[in-house]
Amino acid sequence: MKAVIIIVALPALFLPLGCLLYIFMQGWSALSWDLLWHGSGSGVGMAMQAIWPQILGSLLMMLLACMMAAPIALALALFSALWASGKQKYGLMVFLQTLQGIPPIVYGLCGLVVMVHLLHWGISLMAGGVILAVVILPLLSSNMIHALERIPAEQSESAQALGLRVEGLVWRVWMPQAWKGMLTGLLLGMARSLSETAPILFTATVFSGVMWPDSIFSPVTSLQTHIFYLAQEGSNAYAIDVAWASAVVLLGLILLFSLTANWLRRIEVKA
Amino acid sequence: MKILQQEQMREATDDVIQSVELSVQGLSLGLSGKPILKAISCQLFHTGITSLIGPSGAGKSSLLRCLNMLYDDWQGEIAIEGKSIRAWQGGVDALRQHVGLIAQKPAVFPVSIYENVIFGMPKKARKQNQDAWVEQCLKQAALWDEVKARLHEPASALSIGQQQRLCLARALALKPKILLLDEPTASLDPRSKQLIEASLHQLSASITVLCVTHDLEQAQRLQGQVIFMCDGKVIESGDADAFFQHPERMETREFLRWSVCDCD
């Protein structure tokens, strides 16, 4: 019985691992210092360009999204811990879980209609940042809520019984214990925002003509959409190579944030 | 002669009024639509120990939380030295420093033993050297000898019994006039139980102690006053010796004999 279960379960491990290995094998050979910083003369169109603007564009949108989503998620978590009733907490968690299930392309469409057209922001870093913030907000919020829930209720009651005000309770009792869990959530949110393509496809990125956004309301390029564009150039072998290399860089960034988040979680559990 | 007698009577009455530290009048509390406390009235006298006994669900812990304003959605009147706690000078935070509460399960903060003792003190006081005060509080809580060599080690490394005494020291550091304890020895070993009881006896000489306990023998050992609660009501109260030897109410006698109470 044990053997059967293991055999059935093995694909869960090997299929993603196989994909990752294949991407690294394909992309590693195409990845070079020149590709990152100078570009190459051997390709055509986008494939000729260096990918640093795309890396920076992705990181910029990620940072903007996290800067917008993190304070909102923290406020939501604090409201839930301080004042929400049991029913409100339950309703909030159901709402956040439902939001996490919404397809990102729907957010992208919403961003296109509301931010790009109605608010006249145009295709811009701002629109991309806001829509990514909306995408990662449920993940960030639920992580922060869980981080606060892990603090024993007795500690909160004891702190209040000592006469600590809400600020004292939050900064002296909750934050010193919850920050690792919150940071873990933030890092996972960063990884999630780097892995999203659909929401920024309509709202923030262009395929060419942009190296660096002039302002927050300028379009930007990103690794995710760069890979999407290059993959469509099926006849151009060099473009496909650059797409693999870009995928390796993107995966590297996502793994960096995810593994750091897991490391922090391990420290938190040990503490 | 008559005027002198009246004067003496008035002085005696004043003494009784002055000696009442805390009075509860018609206190009612409901949680999630369920009545927990039903028009309770009782008094705690200045200094001394009062044991609050009764079966589970009688409302003992809820009463403590009302006295400390951790529950604030109650009706009735709670006054300390004649002043309503709802209109306490300095607000709820100041009241909670005046009325310390120690929970059944010790909850130390993830900082050092020393920092735990001064945790509730104002920021300015925490920045000053509090070595002597920390030592005094830990001595009052019968913990000093066990921790004096490791004051700056994490409090979480202490045993449960030591953690409970640390919570006592932490509450004492705020110089409370009233100390509320919610089954402070429920999960402790006999040695820790004995140490806490001894501390409470010493403390009761200078502050008013209200201790919830399920342990009737402990209530007898603590002496002082006893309040017996059942189903959100105060059934009987009085001096511990008289209460245990000659209980007046049938419900009390049943509870003392069988540890059950049918107050409906």
Image (spheres, helix red, strand yellow):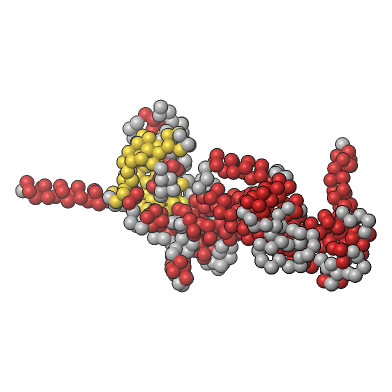
**Picture quadrant where residue A179 is located:** bottom right
Residue at x 43%, y 28% (from the top left corner): B262
| Count of number-bearing discs | 0
Q: Is residue A210 left or right of residue B170?
A: right
Q: Nearer the viewer, residue B141 or A73?
A: A73
Residue B75 location (% of width, % of height): 36, 40
Quarter of the image that includes the C terminus of chain A? bottom right
Image position, residue A226 (x, y; %): 81, 59
Q: Which residue is drawn at 87% across and 40% down?
A: A8
Position of A37 with respect to A189 (left or right) is right
In the image, taking residue A32 as reference, residue B117 lies left or right, namely: left
Asked if residue A137 shows in the view, the reply is no
Extreme residue toward the left, this view? B1
At 87% across and 36% down in the image, what residue appears? A1
When asked about the image quadrant of residue B53, the answer is top left
Towards the viewer: A42 or A57: A42
Place of residue A79 in the rendered image (x, y in percent of width and height, measured from the top left): 53, 50
Image coordinates for residue A239, horizontal then vertical, percent: 89, 60
Judge by depth and name the residue closer to the eye, A116 or A161.
A116
Q: Between residues A253 and A210, which one lies in front from this camera angle?
A: A210
Q: Residue at x 48, y 49 (%)?
A: B103
Locate residue B5 relative to residue A97 in the image: left or right: left
Instruction: Name which quarter of the figure residue A24 lies in.
Output: bottom right
Q: Is residue A91 visible?
A: yes
